[in-house]
Image (cartoon, coloured by chain):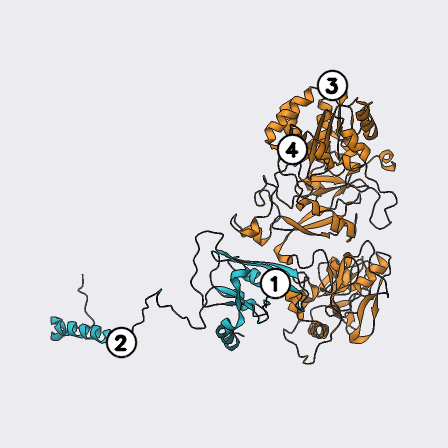
Amino acid sequence: MSVKKRKKDLNFFEKIYIVEIAKGMMLTLRNMFRPKFTMEYPEVKFEPPSSYRGRPVLVQEKNNVERCVACGLCSRVCPALAIEVQANETELEKERYPEKFEINMLRCIFCGFCEEVCPEEAIVMSKDYELVFSNRNDAIYGKDKLLVQVEQLSDRLDYLRKFKQ
Amino acid sequence: MPIFIVDGHQVEFKPGQTIIEASRNAGISIPHFCWHPKLSISGNCRICLVEVEKMPKLVIACSTYASEGMVVHTKSEKTIDARNAVMEFILINHPLDCPICDEAGECKLQEYAYSHGKGESRFEEIKNRKEKRVQLGPHIKFDGERCISCSRCIRFSDEIAHANQLTFRNRGDKVTVTTFPGELFDNPYTLNTVDICPVGALTNNDFRFKSRVWEMSSTDSICIGCSRGCNTEMWVRNNEILRLTPRKNDEVNSAWMCDNGRLNTFKFVNAENRIDGTYLRFNGFLKKAELSSAINFTAKKIKEFKSNEIAFIGSAYATCEDNFVLAKFAKSLGVQNIDFPKHIALGDCDDILIMEDKTPNSFGAELVGVKPINNGNSFESIITNIESGKIKALYIIDEDIASISDKYEKNLTKLDLLVVHSSNENKTTALADVVFPSSTYAEKNGTFVNFNGRIQRIKPAVTTEEMDRALDGMNMSRWDKFGTKFDRWMQGRRVDAKSSWNILSMLSLHLNGKMKYDMAEEVFADIASSIEEFKGLDYDMVGSKGINLKIKESIKVK
């Protein structure tokens, strides 16, 4: 059995460790005066960047009409089958609107495919990451919870224009 | 047979066949919009251009006759280039509104744009604006912008429906389909144009925006609107039937079905008034009861009557299996009064599809034995004998006798025992002592025999409480495959109902142990072994398109 050779033999100062310990303490000391990255959640809330994929929401225009035309592509592309859409006819020019739009947040995996496939930029990933529910039914978000005014989503929409093909 | 060559394959053809027809029979498909196998040749879409050797220019495959030794290329560079060019041309004025178009998913233009399109448009001008959401007729909305002017709908209304109601108006890129001024597109076959429209220009008012096509499952079925027995496909989502479409069967309905059959023969399946569970009459009121106790009660009651005091009424809406088991049950009790009411609308017929007999299975019901035995009473005399008090107990399956006339309703009140199998609440169930929930034609296996003696199969498309889509081998959509009981899109209504033959066999088992069936196949095997016309048949032989029974000429004439 051969004795394994070290790549580099330690020198005298390294062998006594004291210098190394002092170095380590210095590092700790330096970091004590650096800015903190941890937050006192929930007193302090994390504001995610615009690339963040929070819960998907529906964009509501200024005249309170949703952009969605209930084409069902988000529902089709959703790998977790979280989205259910029921279309109906409207007198507006867009012809159809979602009579029912439900996202099961227990199924949603926040992949953002729905946003990517949407031809109308009507479903986008918001910055909302606080999802709490205590039973299965509450986890199904209907139009009442999903519709968000367009100005609250301007960050994400600008980001999409800039980076999404 | 003479031979020509398509893409290096030798293809046989009958003289007079066009290139597209002959190639299609050989399994080589050539893109087409305006050509339809059941309609005349129009040749205006130009997507079927193919290269034929020794011809100076490309020719359209739909109106060029195949000839001996012809060499056709459908995948050559020249052909593909031409096809892409035609595609680009058609797409110039076609709106990019697939997301709101009902045809998306079964749209020829969408498919070909995918396989032959450039993926982008070089057309920078503003697209043509035309009329949208035009109510062409009672059942159809027309979108002028989506129309690619293939003229299929016009040719259908001229050649198949013989109605001559549609025409082109204007020319060039302003051309649009319209009815004549002040007229409606309202013949009995209008909705077939929605099926043959290669784009989403014509949409069905009844189905419009109900569902995307890829969300539904489709199951082969038979229309119950009349004794023609048109082959249909039943489209189901969340256990609800959303539409019916015709299925091609040259022996029966070609590729068409009538609007009445398409719109009015499935809504009762998902109606609010479905009978859910068994009902027994207590103190004058129908109350929900256990199936077993209802069977006990019925068996006990039936024993109290003499065989000539009992009558059985079968149904031409029920399957052969139901009627056969009813007839066998009647025979086991020695009852000779058995018949079924005819539903004939005199004069309501044409020489296209619609028949006077408004039931799908009157021939079948008669063949399997639902007809008076020996000196038994026929339907009319059963009713008169109820009035005179000779018949005291009546057993009805899947028929609403009381709604036929007020006199019948009054007569039914005179009965001592009225047992009814019914899928929906109606006037007859309101009078019944026992109501068994029977499943509809959309929820069971079975067979119908049409006016011509052709036996055809129905399959379950909607589940009842006791069924399971996966375990029962029913067709499933993506939602059905991956859904759980916690998903709202799986929580569609499931009715507690059973096939009539199933209820009857349970009753018989309880009463005299003469019959025991667990599956429709077993019933059919029994039919095949005991009824002359059905000899040797099984469900596999009947297949998806049916088979003609060997009917003796003497019966056929009747």
The Cα–Cα distance between marks 3 and 1, rounded to whole angstroms, is 63 Å
Subunit under mark 1: A
Decide if residue B529 is in sight here.
no
Disc 2 marks which residue? A34
Which residue occupies the foreground of this view, B461 or A61?
A61
Residue type highlighted by circle 4: Asn
- Quarter of the image where the N terminus of chain A is located: bottom left
- Residue toward you, B300 or A27: B300
Residue position marked by numbered label 1 in the rendering: A70
Disc 4 and disc 2 in contact, CB within 8 angstroms: no
Q: Earlier in the sequence, mark 1 or mark 2?
A: 2
Q: Quote the CA–CA distance across marks 1 and 4.
A: 42 Å
Amino acid found under the numbered disc labelled 1: Ala
For label 3, the crowd category at 10 Å Cα-Cα, with few meaning under 14, some 14 to 19 and many 20 or more, is: some
Chain letter, colour cyan: A
The quarter in which the C terminus of chain A is drawn is: bottom right
Q: Amino acid at mark 3?
A: Lys
In space, the residues marked 2 and 3 are separated at their CA atoms by 101 Å
Q: What SS does tag 1 mark?
A: loop
- Disc on the earlier residue, 3 or 4: 3
Label 1 with label 2: CB-CB less than 8 Å: no
Residue in the picture at 53% in, 76% down = A161
B188 lies above or below B143: above
Please state which amino acid type lies under the numbered disc 2: Arg
Disc 3, SS: loop
Residues at discs 1 and 4 both on one chain: no
Task: Provide the letter of the chain coloured orange.
Answer: B
Say above or below: B543 vs B306: below
Residue found 71% across the figure and 58% down from its top = B27
Task: Tell me residue B273's x, y (percent).
Answer: 67, 42
